[in-house]
Amino acid sequence: VTRTVDAPPEIVFEAWTKADLFRRWWVPRSLGVTLTSCELDVREGGTYRLAFRHPSAPDEMVFHGRYLEVAPPSRLVWTNDEGDSGGQVTAVTFQGDAGRTLVVVRELYPTKEALDEALESGATGWNDESFGQLDELLGVAAG
């Protein structure tokens, strides 16, 4: 996933690493899901835990992992540790150019089957709406 954001890398990186900002843009509003807990210990070896609730689900959905690389403001890499088969590793780079930031998200799945399953389930389709919400947040922060 590639997206250009109208803010410098330092500000965009903060939106990905500060819980109070992250929780304001990460979850697509159209899903009707509430982010009930957002714990980010953004340092190499640090962990994250995100808990979500949907009105139709009796239990919270929890996603968690650990940060493998943290290089402000240019790179973040983390694991996605939920599930039995080992999750994907997500790498995000932030490249500045004239006050804007090119954000590139790459995910490496442990198997082709895991990738196919993610594609079929729609788990990779959050990006456009979430990035739009990030744009809104940064517009508010910059304005």
Image (cartoon, rainbow, N blue to C red):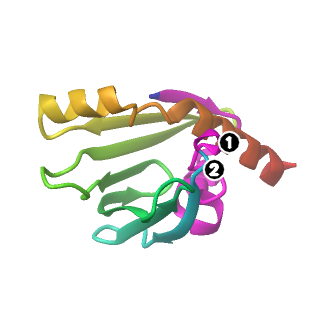
User: Which amino acid does the dot numbered 1 rest on?
Assistant: Gln
The correct choice, above or below, for 4 with respect to 142 in the image is above
**Residue under the image location 20 percent in, 38 percent down:** 109
- Which mark is on residue 18? none
**Chain part drawn in magenta:** 2-31
For label 1, the residue is 133
Residue 58's x, y, as percent? Answer: 45, 63
Q: Secondary structure at mark 2?
A: loop
Report crowding for label 1: few under 14, some 14 to 19, many 20 or more residues within 10 A (C-alpha).
some
For label 2, the residue is 25
The correct choice, above or below, for 101 with respect to 43 in the image is above
**Residue under the image location 82 percent in, 50 percent down:** 140
Can residue 7 be seen at all in this image of the molecule?
no
Residue 91's x, y, as percent? Answer: 34, 44
Residue 49's x, y, as percent? Answer: 40, 68
Q: Nearer the viewer, residue 38 or 17?
A: 38
* Relative horizontal placement of residue 19, taking residue 83 as reference (left or right): right
User: Which amino acid does the dot numbered 2 rest on?
Assistant: Trp
Q: Nearer the viewer, residue 8 or 58?
A: 58
Quadrant of the image occupied by residue 23: bottom right
Quadrant of the image occupied by residue 46: bottom left
* Relative horizontal placement of residue 125, taking residue 25 as reference (left or right): left
* Relative horizontal placement of residue 57, taking residue 113 as reference (left or right): right
What is the quadrant of the N terminus in the image? top left
